[in-house]
Image (spheres, rainbow, N blue to C red):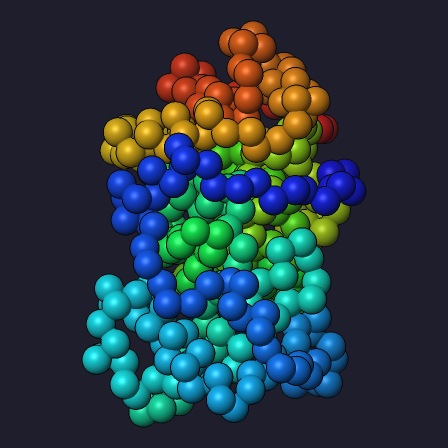
């Protein structure tokens, strides 16, 4: 089973990545930074409806500062949603600002409430980490999911990705009549393949959500990554395959119990084909992103050497051994979509069934 024991360092945004962000309107001026939010006056523990600690704290600002901070946060939300037009958002208010005390990055989560209908939304303000930015942009370009995020200097702003948290979905849906086993297994196979191709790691239950989409005669599922901290960092291929995390075993079991090997192979090939189509559609932009990635150090030399060896074995292709960094490995991983539309599967190791 896969596990991550070492804390990943934060990689600063390089001039190469910064230029990409400027060229594609991801770098934008914002009135408040990540560091500014640490000037809060006090905090209180945030509990859920059952009174359990959520590992988040609600931060409180001095009364003299609160009005200005809340206005700046509404302006940031407007930049995310309506190109900065605050005039259409006068009915919004900042209901709460929370700080996560669990994990590497200590993000802030801002809750925005519509005062007309009491509906609410969230967005996040984090320290800008090159790994996370590359992961967000690769997900935006190559997955079925579009992600809105902005960067300013050392500040990263991300929209909220809705869905049932993966660990909650596993606990409350799997093993009950609330889930269609075959459809869930199919989606997990596709999600597993996307993570491997993009080299997005650590997709255990609390790092993805499940969208449950009712149709006129069936229910569909979509798994979406929500944490991109482990983009192309680890040296083990198992870290980039959600099936190897023990937390995901109940979903893997759905595939083992309901999915024939022929179907698994079909769905893996389908997903690789769809990613290949997206690669062709965004070729110019993707090449610029990968060129920037190829100039950046996003992991240790040991991890690079280990991963290129494991992927060379997976694809039976020694071209991986020529890669000098994680950016080049990601680029070659995407090249494999066209060079080798199918990949090897070790019986009882890589297969679900």
Residue placed most toward the observer, 183 or 79:
79
User: In the rendered image of this protein, does residue 242 appear above or below residue 206?
Assistant: above
Give how far across and how far down residue 79 sits, in percent: 30, 65
**Closer-to-camera residue (179/166):** 166
If the image is split into quadrants, where does the N terminus sit? top right
Residue 46: quadrant of the picture: bottom right
x%, y% of residue 200? 55, 39
Look at the picture and state if 232 lies above or below 169.
above
> In the image, is 43 to the left or to the right of 337?
right
Q: Residue furthest front?
A: 64
How far across and how far down the image is residue 143, in percent?
40, 43
- Residue 300: which quarter of the image? top right
For residue 174, above or below residue 39: above
Choose between 178 and 164: the one closer to the eye.
164
Residue 207: percent from left, percent from top: 60, 54
Query: Does 42 sit left or right of 19 as displayed?
Result: right
Q: Quadrant of the C terminus?
A: top right
Q: Depth check: 341 or 55 in front?
A: 55
Q: Residue at x 70, y 63 (%)?
A: 102
In the rendered image of this protein, does residue 227 appear above or below residue 35?
above
Name which residue lies at 70% across and 22% down: 302
Identified at 73% across, 85% down, the residue is 51
The answer to whether residue 113 is visible is: no
Look at 36% across and 63% down and name the residue there.
30
- Look at the image and tell me whether residue 21 can be seen: yes
Instruction: Give the tally of numbered discs.
Output: 0
């Amino acid at each position: 089973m896969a596990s991550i024991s070492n804390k990943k360092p934060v990689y600063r945004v390089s001039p190469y990545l910064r230029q990409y962000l400027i060229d594609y309107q991801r770098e934008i001026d914002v009135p408040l930074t990540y560091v500014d939010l640490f000037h809060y006056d006090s905090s209180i523990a945030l509990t859920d409806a059952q009174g359990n600690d959520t590992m988040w704290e609600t931060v409180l600002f001095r009364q003299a500062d609160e009005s200005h901070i809340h206005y700046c946060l509404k302006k940031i939300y407007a930049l995310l949603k309506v190109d900065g037009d605050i005039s259409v958002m006068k009915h919004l208010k900042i209901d709460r600002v929370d700080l996560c005390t669990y994990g590497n990055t200590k993000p802030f989560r801002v809750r925005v409430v519509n005062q007309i209908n009491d509906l609410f939304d969230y967005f996040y303000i984090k320290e800008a980490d090159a790994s996370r930015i590359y992961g967000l942009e690769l997900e935006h370009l190559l997955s079925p999911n579009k992600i809105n995020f902005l960067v300013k200097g050392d500040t990263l702003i991300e929209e909220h990705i809705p869905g049932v948290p993966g660990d909650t979905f596993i606990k409350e849906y799997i093993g009950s009549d609330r889930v269609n086993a075959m459809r869930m297994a199919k989606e997990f196979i596709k999600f597993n393949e996307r993570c491997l191709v993009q080299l997005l790691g650590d997709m255990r239950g609390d790092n993805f959500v499940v969208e449950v989409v009712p149709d006129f005669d069936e229910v569909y599922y979509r798994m979406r990554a929500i944490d991109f901290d482990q983009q192309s960092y680890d040296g083990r291929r198992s870290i980039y395959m959600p099936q190897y995390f023990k937390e995901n075993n109940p979903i893997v079991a759905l595939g083992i119990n309901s999915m024939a090997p022929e179907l698994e192979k079909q769905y893996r090939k389908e997903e690789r084909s769809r990613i290949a189509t997206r690669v062709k559609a965004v070729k110019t932009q993707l090449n610029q992103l990968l060129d920037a990635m190829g100039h950046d150090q996003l992991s240790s030399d040991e991890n690079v050497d280990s991963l290129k060896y494991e992927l060379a074995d997976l694809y039976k292709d020694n071209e991986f051994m020529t890669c000098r960094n994680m950016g080049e490995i990601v680029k070659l991983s995407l090249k494999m979509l066209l060079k080798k539309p199918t990949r090897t599967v070790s019986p009882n190791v890589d297969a679900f069934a």
